[in-house]
Amino acid sequence: MNKKLMGIITSLTVVAMFAACGAKEETPETPGTETPGTETPGTEAPAGEELEGSVIVDGSGTVYPLMANIAENYMVNEQPGVSVQVGRAGSSAGLKKFIAGELDFADASRKIKDAEVQELEAAGKKMGENVLEIELAYDGLTMVINKENTWATEMTQEEIINMYISGKYKSDDKVLWSDIRAEWPKEEIKFFGPNENHGTYEFFYEVILDEQDMVSNVNLQQEYSTLVDLVSKDKNAIAFFGYGYYASNTDKLTAVKVDFGNGAVAPSLDTIGSDLEYAGFTRLVYTYLDLDKAKENPAILDYALYVISEEGASKLSGDNGFAPIPAEKHAEYKTILEGLK
C-alpha cells in the first residue's frame, strides 16, 4: 500500500474514532483550510494541476458512510494532495459547527431548521447567497427488529407510529407486543433509536410522530453501531435508523415491511423515493456548503464539484444504502458552482 493511500485511510479512521467518543466530547481542532501555493483565491487551478489543502466536513451519522466514501474516492482518484476530513457528530452538532464557521460542509439527514437559518444570518451568512443546500440522495427510515422476532415482520404505518407515542397504549409506556396485535406475544417491547444529536431522531419525532412525545422508556444512543448491537441481542427490541445501516447489517437484523395503505413494502433501493412505494418513510439527506469558503479555496470548490458529479453521490449512493436523486438536480448545483470560478 503506498504512503498516500495509507495517509488517506488513517485520516478517515482518526476522525471516526473521535466521533465515536460521543457528542459531548470536543472534537480535535482541524488544520485551517488555506491552500498553500501561489494560486489566487477564488480562481480555478489549471486543468490537470494537483491541488493541496484541507476540506472539513462534519455532521450526520447517517450521511457519514456516503460522504466518507466520496471523500476516499476523491483523495485516491482525483486529488491526493487534498485532505478531506469527514466527521459524524450528528446533524444538529454539525450544523452548529457550520454556523460557527468551523466547517466547509455540514452533512444533515434532515433539512436545516428556520432557527438555524436565522443563526446563519446573524453570523452574516444567507442561504442561497453564502450557503448552498445540496440534496445528496434519498434515505428510507427503516424499522429493525431482532432476527428471532417472527411476528412483527410486517406492520402498518399507524401501528409503528402509535407504538412509539407516549401513553398511546399504556400510561407507563410499558407496551407489550400483544397491545399492538392480540395474537402477538405478551412480552414488553424494548424501544430504541438514535439520540437528539441526530437528524434521524428529529425526522422521526417531528415528521413521523408529528411532534408527539415519544415513549418515556425509549433507549436513545449516539452510535448506530450500538443500536445494531442492542437490537441483535434482544428478541423484543425494535429500533429506527437509516436504511444504509440496516443494509450493512442484514445478517444481524430484520427490516419491518411497512403497510402504508396498499400492502406491506420492504425498504430497498427500488422502493425508497419521493414517489415510490416506500415514500411514507422516505426523506432527503443533505450537505450544506459554505460558498464563501468555496470561492476562496480551490480545493473546497473542486471537492464540491466532485460530490455532485457522476462519480460522486450519484454513483456511490447505492453502495451506501441510499437511492440517488434525479441527475437534473445535481446538474443545477454544477451550474451554480461553476459560476464561482
Image: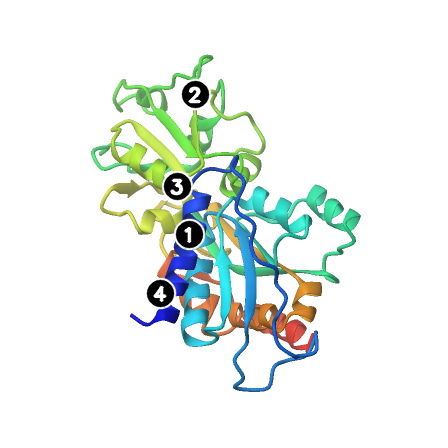
What residue sits 53% from the left and 69% below the top?
308
Q: What element carries label 1?
A: helix
Which circle's residue, 2 or 1, is located before the other in the chain? 1
Residue 272 picture location, percent across and down: 42, 54
Q: Disc 4 and disc 2: Cα gap in Å?
A: 44 Å
Sequence order check, earlier mark of 2 and 3: 2
**Mark 4 or mark 2, whichever is nearer to me:** 4
Q: Which mark is residue 217?
A: 2
Circle 2: element type: loop
How far apart marks 4 and 1 lie (CA) works out to 12 Å
Q: Nearer the viewer, mark 3 or mark 4?
A: 4
Q: What residue type is labelled 3?
A: Tyr
Labels 2, 1: front one: 1
**Callout 4 amino acid:** Met
Q: From this viewpoint, which residue is outermost toward the top?
A: 171
Mark number displayed over residue 14: 1
Quadrant position of the C terminus in the picture: bottom right
Viewer-closest of 254 and 69: 69
Mark sitting on residue 191:
none
Q: Which mark lies nearer to you, 1 or 3?
A: 1
Q: Position of residue 181 (x, y in %)?
A: 32, 24
Q: Categorize mark 1 by other alpha carbons within 10 Å: few (<14), some (14-19), many (20+).
A: few
- Chain-order first, disc 3 or disc 4: 4
Which residue has dot 3 on it?
224
Q: Which residue is drawn at 24% across and 42% down?
A: 252
Q: Do the residues labelled 2 and 3 touch (CB within 8 Å)?
A: no
**Residue picked out by circle 4:** 6
Left or right relative to 295: residue 304: left
Position of residue 3 in the picture relative to residue 38 (left or right):
left
Quadrant hosting residue 160: top left
